[in-house]
Image: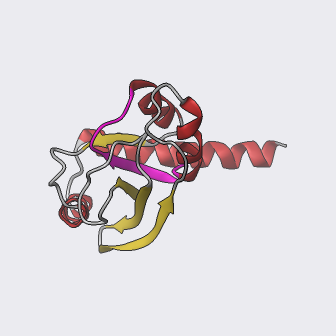
Amino acid sequence: MKIAFTTTDRVHINAHFGWAKEIDVYEVADDGYEFLETLKFEGDLKQDGNEDKITPKLDALNDCTIVYVTAIGGSAAARLIKKGVTPVKARSEEEEIADILTKLVKTLKGNPPPWLRKALMQKTQTFEEELEEETTV
C-alpha cells in the first residue's frame, strides 16, 4: 500500500495538508518499506478558502491508502475520504516518517487495528469496483 507524508524536511511529518509544498510517498508492505517519490506543489498554498489548491494533491494521492499530516481542513479531509484515502494527524511536528513506517510494517505483520483494516478494505473495494466498471462498459 502507498502511504504519504506532508513534510518540509523529508524527515518529520511537519506540514499542513493544504500548505504542503512536498508530500513524500512510500510503498509499505509487511516485509518493509521503500521510498517512491516526492510530490511537489507550487503556488500560493497558504491562501485559506482556496479549494482549488488541494485538487492537484487529491489527484496525486488518489492511489494512496493513508496520508499523514500535522493538520488538515475539514473539506479537504472529507474529499480525501471520499477518494478512499484516510488522513491521519501526526502526534506532533517532531514525529518522524521512518518511525511511522517501521510501526506500519510491524502492524501489517500482526493484527492491524480496525481503522487500518477499514482503510485497506476501502482501497481494495474501490479498486475492485473500478475493475467491475471497466468490464461492464
Is 117 placed left or right of 106 in the picture? right
Q: Which residue is drawn at 48% across and 37% down?
A: 80
Q: Residue at x 47, y 33 (%)?
A: 47
Of the pair 124 and 85, the residue shown nearer to us: 85
Residue 21 visible to an observer of this rendering: yes
Q: Give the farthest residue toward the right.
A: 137
Total numbered labels: 0
* Residue 16 x/y as whole percent: 34, 42
Q: What sort of colour scheme is used for the picture?
A: secondary structure
Q: What stretch is highlighted in magenta?
A: 61-73
Of the pair 16 and 96, the residue shown nearer to us: 16
Is 29 placed left or right of 14 in the picture? right
Q: Is residue 46 above or below residue 60?
A: above
- The answer to which image quadrant residue 121 occupies is top left
Q: Residue at x 31, y 48 (%)?
A: 15
Tell me the quadrant of the picture where the C terminus can be found: top right
- The answer to which image quadrant residue 32 occupies is bottom left
